[in-house]
Amino acid sequence: MPPTNATAPAAPPPAPPAPPTMVRKHPCPECGANLEWSAARQSLQCPYCGTLVPWSDETREQLGSSVAEQDLQAALRNPESGRGWGPERREVQCQNCRAISVFVDGRVAQRCDFCGSPAIVAHEERNDAITPQSILPFKISDGQVRERIRQWYGSRWFAPSKLKNAALTDTLHGAYLPYWTFDAHVDASWQAEAGYYYYTTEQYRDSNGRAQTRQVRHVRWESAAGQLQHFFDDELVPGTVGVHAKLLRQIEPFPTITDLKPYTPEFVRGWTVERYQIDLGRAAQRNETDMDAQVQQLCAAQVPGDTQRNLRVQRQYRGRTFKHILVPVWLVGYTYGRKTYQVVANGYTGTIAGEQPYSWMKIFFTALAVLIVIALVMAGSGR
């Protein structure tokens, strides 16, 4: 029996932190090359021998943990936590649209995938970027999206004929865009004046001097108050500057609540990844502004009566969490004349939104044709 005053063995030193997810490998079982995500096959695929590795629970366990929410206040208090993409990457910045692209497979971009500009320069690699925690992989393949974009161009009646004939699908690129998602519980109380309509009968004389009656609407105002509890789940705030904001809103939503997967480099090898330039602090402020507007609407919907005024809302958020995620888009960026245009497709749902130049000759002759038809109709009705 050991003596009672024996010194306990020293505890082993803590294990070194795990390397960033960016450098984790998942080799092909046949040739050992790094696997990549195939949108057409919806599985991991070797770019060299073509071996498919379906995404399964076992693959999920090998590649990383489940998707988890991060505490927002803790992250803002400790800005160094969860940062650093790892060494296996290169960054370039477009001097035209200012987008920063991250490449993890050693390839070198010749043009900006977002605006098509050749003015791209190496960007200083920094380790202060928050690592993506989850990703929504591509589901729509390039073949599928090319056909949808051709159809979209074909429906642009006032676009120049040269544009529609070219279809511009040769500049198609797939890219992962940075997004932030936010969750929060809100407790709110509101006060307002609720208005109830009521009607009285009024007598008046018409233009011929005859007595008439009519119903006149009035409003009876009463004080009203109430409470609201609501949960915001995966509210999206884009972190991109490469894609025009109005186009992003048109191709949302991305099914982040149900279909996100843990981030792993297999999903982004061979694709362009844009690094966020709207950081967590600014994104959280935008999210709070968006939630405030929604809370105002939700409280307004609770006010009884037929109309309302002087709505006052007091709210408090709790349990705010976030995720930094990557979402897939297909991009066509082109220059027509002196202006840059984008066509964007949701890489998961296939929803398309785009910008286009206009042929003023087509618009002029269409308007002229409409005026001629109206004149003919009016001339025929005057006979």
Image (cartoon, helix red, strand yellow):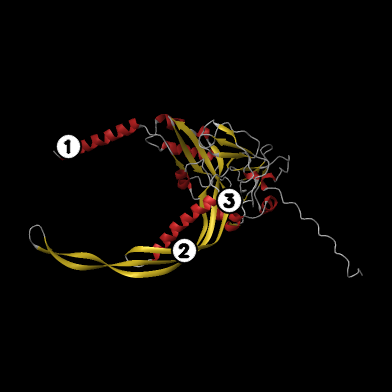
Residue 254 visible here: no
Q: Which mark is residue 379?
A: 1
Under circle 3, the secondary element is strand
The quadrant holding residue 224 is bottom left
Looking at the image, which residue is at 16% across and 40% down?
Answer: 381
The residue where tag 2 is placed is: 315
Amino acid type indicated by mark 1: Ala
Looking at the image, which residue is at 87% across and 64% down?
Answer: 7
Indicate which disc, 1 or 3, sits on the residue closer to the N terminus: 3
Q: Position of residue 298 (x, y in %)?
A: 42, 62
The quadrant holding residue 206 is bottom left
Looking at the image, which residue is at 62% across and 54% down?
Answer: 78
On screen, 6 above or below 373?
A: below
Mark 2 or 3: in front is: 2
157 vs 192, nearest the viewer? 192
The residue where tag 3 is placed is: 324
On screen, 184 above or below 286?
A: below
Q: Dot 1: few (<14), some (14–19), or many (≥20) neighbours within 10 Å?
A: few
